[in-house]
Image (tube, rainbow, N blue to C red):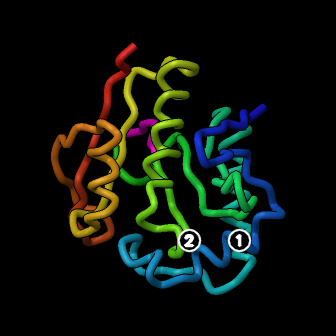
């Protein structure tokens, strides 16, 4: 069973198929996908497929992205959490910390807050030795968040024709 977490302003809960409309609102925005290959979704069916993949992660690995909910308004802000990543870097499987927010929630510290909860859970509860992350070099906000949560820059790599920064953090416990 996937856990639910709380931080000062957020509830992080398992994603459900009923989140499809919120996923569509998030991922159909071209600004949200500017540093994600510029491939916003164009149908609710695509959002449902994304949710299906997350639900498969829950079953297969016992972890996956979580819905980020504003405690005060109960609004879906976006998602955050850990994922067992097997596709981004060839010949390297790893635990990834990530986040994606609706544009109106950018710049308010929600991604940082949720990512810290995710790191804490991964290191303390799952006893992971290392958690990694990647961000397109030009994506200043995401690179800033990753450094802010204590990720260490350890090089660059190419993905989908764009240079990305690579970050990792070792279990401090």
The correct choice, above or below, for 140 with respect to 64 in the image is below
Observer-nearest of 47 and 146: 146
User: Cβ–Cβ below 8 Å for labels 2 and 1?
Assistant: yes
Q: Please say whether residue 95 is one of the residues in the magenta stretch.
A: yes
Rate crowding at label 2 as few (under 14), some (14 to 19) or many (20 or more) other CA atoms within 10 Å.
Answer: some
Q: How many numbered marks have been drawn onto this rendered protein structure?
A: 2
Mark 1 falls on what kind of element?
A: helix
Residue at the front extreme, as displayed: 72
Observer-nearest of 77 and 90: 77
Q: Cα distance, mark 2 to mark 1?
A: 9 Å
Query: In the visual, does 40 lie left or right of 141?
Result: right
Residue at the top extreme, as displayed: 173
Tell me where the magenta segment starts and ends, as one range: 92-97
* Residue that numbered label 2 is attached to: 102
- Image quarter where the N terminus lies is top right
Query: In the visual, does 139 lie left or right of 127?
Result: left
Q: Residue at x 23, y 54 (%)?
A: 165
The correct choice, above or below, for 73 with respect to 82 in the image is below
Mark 2 falls on what kind of element?
A: loop
Q: Please say whether residue 18 is one of the residues in the magenta stretch.
A: no
Q: What is the magenta segment's predominant secondary structure?
A: strand
In percent of width and height, residue 33 lies at: 45, 76
The correct choice, above or below, for 111 with respect to 118 in the image is below
* Residue that numbered label 1 is attached to: 22
């Amino acid at each position: 069973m996937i856990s639910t977490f709380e931080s000062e302003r957020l509830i992080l809960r398992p994603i459900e198929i009923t989140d499809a409309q919120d996923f569509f609102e998030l991922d159909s925005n071209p600004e949200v996908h500017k540093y994600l290959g510029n491939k916003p979704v164009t149908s609710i069916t695509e959002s449902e497929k994304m949710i299906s993949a997350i639900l498969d992660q829950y079953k297969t690995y016992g972890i996956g992205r979580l819905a980020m909910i504003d405690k005060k308004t109960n609004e879906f802000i976006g998602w955050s959490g850990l994922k067992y990543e097997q596709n981004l870097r060839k010949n390297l499987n790893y635990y990834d910390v990530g986040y994606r927010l609706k544009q109106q929630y950018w710049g308010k510290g929600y991604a940082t807050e949720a990512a810290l909860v995710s790191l804490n859970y991964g290191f303390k509860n799952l006893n992971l030795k290392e958690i990694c992350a990647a961000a397109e070099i030009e994506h200043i906000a995401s690179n800033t968040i990753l450094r802010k949560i204590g990720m260490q820059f350890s090089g660059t790599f190419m993905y989908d024709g764009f240079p990305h920064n690579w970050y990792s953090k070792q279990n401090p416990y």
